[in-house]
Amino acid sequence: MSTKTSDRPLSIFANMTGFDRFLSFKPYNASWRQHRKMMHQSLGTEKLSAQYDSVQDLESGRLLLRILAEPRSLIQHFQTQAAAIILRITYGYATEPHSSDPLVGIIEQMMDNLSKTFVPLSWVVDIIPALRFLPNYVPGISFKATARRWYAINDFVTRVPYLFVRQQMVQGNHRLSLVSNFLSDGMEKDGGENIDPDTENTIMAVAGQIYGAAADTTISVLSAFVLAMVMFPEVQHKAQKEIDTMIGSRLPEFQDRECLPYVSAVVKEATRWFPITPIIPAHAANTEIHYKGYRIPKGSCIIASSWWLLRDPATYHDPDSFNPERFLIRNEPDPATVVFGFGRRICPGRFFADKSLFLTISRILALFTISKDVGEARLKLTPGLIAHPEEFPFKIAPRSQLHAERVRDIEKNNPWEQGDASLLRMK
């Protein structure tokens, strides 16, 4: 069945902006299978994702340092951490440690554009495709200018960090990364220093997709986790007690997950309670299907509401509450079966994302306390393909002076490094 429902509906506006080059939005064809294979061979198993544990360990520690220094900028720190991890593993690129990074800034622009591109019925050209043939001066055709601007941003995001890797490889200064591995494989296949343009374009598109697939989604879940700790403080207390009992004074590590079942359940519940894509990106039937008495014509859009699937009271008891024990006592379904998509479109980076969420959440709980601030914190979503909680009041502070010192000790073991922004060819 999945082979018949893995296509994507045609979006004229997405094609005009260049988002159709990315794996998540490509039609189900030979090019999609090639991109998917590259992603799977890089991140698609727990063993493959484990090769990047050291990067996640390093950047989660730096997140804690940033929180201690500027607690009010917590959500921005999540963005910085996600960008640093993804750009390091994808391109071997070190983000600027204490200032805004130009590459991160323009990638965040791209992600905002992406979220707006795929909101259903947002673009008149997707409703009336013939409008794309009208001259630019015709009233109501402003989508063309928007598409040109967004296409230029997408081109920058795929091209500039790729050229950074190539330049560093020529100079012998590159860090190992997904792109350097792709390039080495391509050069070996072609038997020389160069690779063919088609392979080069594929590498750029696959690498550009990784940020969008991983960074914005983890930021969304981490923001929802903070909101949940404000609204359900008893969950935080139980999680901290488990960490103190099982781990003691050291930082939680990946291998501690089995002895922290409640904290692991907190991670699961964060993904269920706040689905990052309330509406899963539409699939399309590439042939006529008959399913349980229903006829689904070829070309039909198939849309799943992850918000409903993960808040169905027939499946999840009291679904509006944030209750990690539902996965321990009641043994309710793992939300991962919905959160990361379905069939052949399932997220290839799901193991990497899950590990990143566990390490970040467990370490924040170990060292900090999140609490209410003036004003009411409520669960409200921002519009877009990838949802985020609307801004809400909160406070975050070290659990004690001893915990603050433990955060400061992180810098002694992992001092800050210089970023690579000056090495980018920004034009």
Image (cartoon, rainbow, N blue to C red):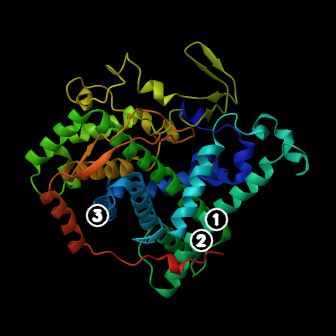
Whole-Å distance between the Cαs marked 1 and 3?
38 Å
As drawn, is 379 to the left or to the right of 246? right
Residue closer to the observer: 133 or 79: 79
For the C terminus, the quadrant is: bottom right
Contact (CB < 8 A) between labels 1 and 3? no
Q: Amino acid at mark 3?
A: Leu
The disc placed on residue 160 is 2
Q: Residue 198 in the image: x percent, y percent?
A: 66, 65
Q: Amino acid at mark 2?
A: Val
Q: Residue at x 19, y 51 (%)?
A: 366
Whole-Å distance between the Cαs marked 1 and 2?
13 Å
Q: Amino acid at mark 1?
A: Asn
Of the residues under marks 1 and 2, which one precedes in the sequence? 2
Q: Residue at x 56, y 60 (%)?
A: 107
Q: Residue beneath label 3, please?
A: 65
The disc placed on residue 201 is 1
Q: Residue 101 in the image: x percent, y percent?
A: 49, 69
Q: Residue 134 in the image: x percent, y percent?
A: 90, 46
Q: How many residues crowd mark 3 within 10 Å: few (<14), some (14–19), many (20+)?
A: many
Q: Residue at x 32, y 20 (%)?
A: 318
